[in-house]
Image (cartoon, rainbow, N blue to C red):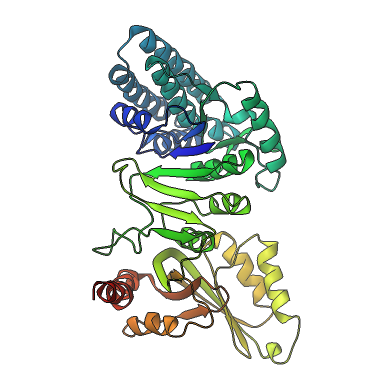
Amino acid sequence: MKIMKFGGTSVGSAERMGAVSQLIPAREPVIVVLSAMSGTTNHLVQIGQQLAQAEKAPAASLTDQLEQRYKQVVAELYKQEASKDKAKQVLSTVFTDIRTCLEQPFSPAIEKIILAQGELLSTQLFHIFQEEQGIASVLLPALEFMKITQDEEPDMAFIRENIQKQLAQYPDTHLFITQGYICRNAKNEIDNLKRGGSDYSASLIGAAVKASEIQIWTDIDGMHNNDPRVVKNTYPIAELSFDEAAELAYFGAKILHPSSILPAQQQNIPVRLLNTMQPEAAGTIISSKRSGNQIKAVAAKDGITAIKIKSSRMLLAYGFLRSVFEVFERFKTPIDMITTSEVAVSLTIDNPAFLPEITEVLQRFGTVEIDSDLTIICVVGDFMEDRPGAALKVVQSLRNIPLRMISYGGSKNNISLLVNTAQKEEALIAINEGVFQEKKEASNA
């Protein structure tokens, strides 16, 4: 069985939904995972924000606007009146649910119910479209099997057991359609896997059913070697290992949700990144295979804060770093990079929500310096110990840019460099010219 996940732009209009239908194989077992139509989640977020501010009239107006957009989609998507009537009933039910939420006192639970409606809309409309085309399909409600624990981690045992129960009811069906992003939490309330979570849904479902392949369809022809919004002449990478792809996703490659690699990797299921606008393009295949090339790609992660703790108590002392790390554990704040010297430790975080509290506690250990507006440049490849020169190429290409921190050796797949965000674009272009352009010229020679 294959998993085919289609993002918001892939199902962003009646025309795009029709194109997606053409990509689904006719006789092969497939679970199609859909995001909300492009722009819908942002619109629902705005409705929630207005409701949180007790601005019910603007929230109601936004709801009306979104409903009108979907009425237009229904008019364009279906040819048969029976299909249009079914779709109109879906719209009536969903938008009644949203308006019911507008009459309730605002709470995070109400907000999450509102946010879930985008995926519920896209999947039901697509299911009706398949029916109109004479294609047998089953709508699998994700809220019946997708669940997270109290720690907001996927409850894999529950997911595996309950999706198998759902599938077992339809042994002769080849096409299943379900929602990405949405789930239930430990309290059985409607919740979600955060923005971009449809990729994560696809990977979790793939792992639960032991799929042969997980396909992530977007509007980009695979993972590129650099940020195409900043750098000219980037190119898609044909192959990546699971570890390389995970590093790129975590450090800023927007095409893939950072959490979506691990479930597939644990079950050794290949993940293929494809482009709905250019379905003939090869895309990128992510698997356990290592290609052996030194440098594959670069990504950038903004919004980084650096924290430096300087203390003579570090000198020849054991337990100091543990005490520092316990502070970040207490405030549930992950650390991205870390470097140490005899009397100082520097580290970076991407979530400054508890920065004042963290700083106050760290000042008990020594002098604390905070620096913000930083970016981590992550260079990913296969940096084995017996392959000299890879790190040198990266650092030399950035010789005109001040490097705040360098992390190398913690992973065989990653060189991380910290720069001022103001110099991010310059750094990406410099690496492209100093590393990838050289590789391209060498391959053409």
Q: Where is residue 378 in the image (x, y as percent from the top left)?
A: 44, 69
346 or 240, nearer to the observer: 240
- Residue 177 vs 340, above or below: the answer is above
Q: How many marks?
A: 0
- Residue at left 42%, top 12%? 86
- What is the x, y in percent for residue 413? 51, 70
Q: In which quarter of the image is residue 357?
A: bottom right
In this view, the residue in front, 268 or 427, is: 268
Please tell me whether residue 109 is drawn above or below residue 298 in the rendered image: above
Give x and y (percent) for residue 424: 35, 70
- State the residue lying farthest toward the top: 82
Q: Quadrant of the C terminus?
A: bottom left
Q: Where is residue 119 in the image (x, y as percent from the top left)?
A: 47, 31
Question: Is residue 373 among the parts visible in the rendering?
Answer: no
Side of 264 where 317 appears, left or right: right
Q: Which residue is drawn at 37% across and 70% down?
A: 421
Picture quarter containing residue 420? bottom left
**Residue appearing at x 65%, y 66% in the figure:** 328
Quadrant of the rendering where the N terminus is positioned: top right
| Residue 64 visible in the snapshot | yes
Residue depicted at x 40% and y 42%: 217
Above or below 194: residue 411: below
Q: Left or right: where does residue 228 sit relative to residue 30?
A: left
